[in-house]
Amino acid sequence: HRYNGKYTDTTNRAVAKELGEQLMLDGVSGITEEYVLDNFQFWGYNPPFTLPYFRRNEVWLKLNDDQVSYLKEKYPSSNRLVGGSSSNSMTGRSMFTLGLCGLVVGAYAVGFIFRSRSQYRRI
């Protein structure tokens, strides 16, 4: 289960509980809150100086073969990962447009700063 933000033991345990609750709602047998809290793993991928909003964190839970088979049967179209860098939600054209908008906003901000500084020099 992927999430962003600051990671603490409390946060990791809360996200692991959410993952366990979702698995229980999906009907996976053998998943209990105690099992989840005893067997989850936390993975953090960014250095500590990364702003919390931009951190990529994950909580993993080991499933046995029967549980994996059950999920594959229940959700047969989930053969590939959805989201993250493997998602095709942002096409090349969308990325270009987003970058161009950022460039325009940045150029406008720099021009505004220089214009406002030049007005103070005249006084």
Image (tube, grey):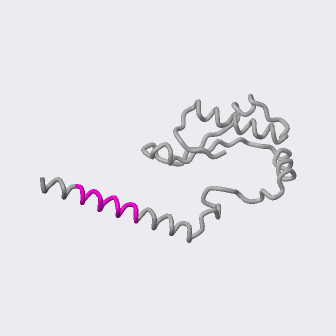
Foreground pick, 33 / 51: 51
**Predominant SS along the magenta part:** helix
Q: For residue 90, which quarter of the picture?
A: bottom right
Q: Quadrant of the N terminus?
A: top right
- Start-end of magenta stretch: 104-116
Task: Inspect the magenta stretch and tell me whether residue 117 lies in it.
Answer: no
Q: Is residue 83 above or below residue 20?
A: below
Q: Give the left or right position of residue 102, taking residue 6 as reference.
A: left
Foreground pick, 71 / 39: 71
Q: Give the left or right position of residue 97, taking residue 109 as reference.
A: right
Q: Give the left or right position of residue 5, taking residue 40 as reference.
A: left
Q: Is residue 113 above or below residue 50?
A: below
Q: For residue 113, which quarter of the picture?
A: bottom left
Foreground pick, 65 / 98: 98
Relative image position of residue 40 (x, y in whole percent): 68, 37
Q: Name the residue: 53% across, 66% down.
A: 95
Q: Residue furthest toward the bottom? A: 93
Relative image position of residue 39 (x, y in whole percent): 70, 35
Task: Inspect the magenta stretch and tell me whether residue 108 lies in it.
Answer: yes
Q: For residue 84, which quarter of the picture?
A: bottom right
